[in-house]
Amino acid sequence: MDIDDPLALEHQVCFALAVAARSVVAAYRPVLEPLGLSHPQYLVMLSLWENDGQSLKDLSAALHLEPATASPLVKRLEALGLVLRERSASDERTLTISLTDAGHDLRARALEVPVTMLERLGMTASELLEANAFLHRLISSAQKATDPVPTRSPA
């Protein structure tokens, strides 16, 4: 990498990802508003539309969130009448999250979200699929890079 200043903000992947994440979530906001969902709530619903009846633990894992972070999202969706939280009869520690009829019905309206986002972002489906694949590889690499960085002794 030929960079004059390796610490220049514009060359930092972490900066580009942070700005991209905030920008994309902001672009989703007006699209999700008519559905009555925030972006994090939309992610919960996407996971449940794909796999209804998940435990809070499994839902949290699918979203790469701690259960303590996912739980308030689920509670808000329950207050909106979109999901039910039920304790397992066989194991009271397990909280199962299931879609209500209203939660199932919302999926039909949400089908417009991906189409609208393609238009808003001015990208083709293949460009977004390529970006998504790259980001998933980056996530995987970053998750593998959890070993502590060795410290260098002063020269």
Image: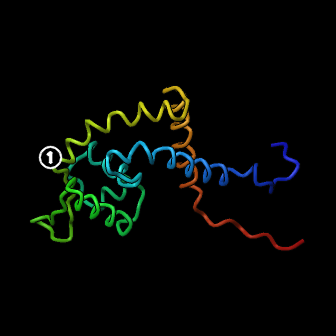
Q: Is residue 137 left or right of residue 93?
A: right
Which amino acid, mark 1? Asp
Q: Quadrant of residue 116?
A: top left
Q: Residue at x 33, y 52 (%)?
A: 44
**Residue 70 sits above or below residue 27 on the image:** below
Q: Residue at x 35, y 59 (%)?
A: 60
Instruction: Provide the secondary structure element on which disc 1 rests.
Output: helix
Residue occupied by mark 1: 101
Q: Residue at x 14, y 64 (%)?
A: 88
Rendered location of residue 121, percent (x, y): 54, 35
Along the line of sight, which residue is nearer the eye, 36 or 1? 36
Q: Residue at x 68, y 50 (%)?
A: 13
Q: Is residue 49 left or right of residue 60?
A: left
Along the line of sight, which residue is nearer the eye, 38 or 5? 38
Where the C terminus falls, by quadrant? Answer: bottom right
Direction bottom: furthest residue = 154
**Residue 124 sits above or below residue 91 on the image:** above
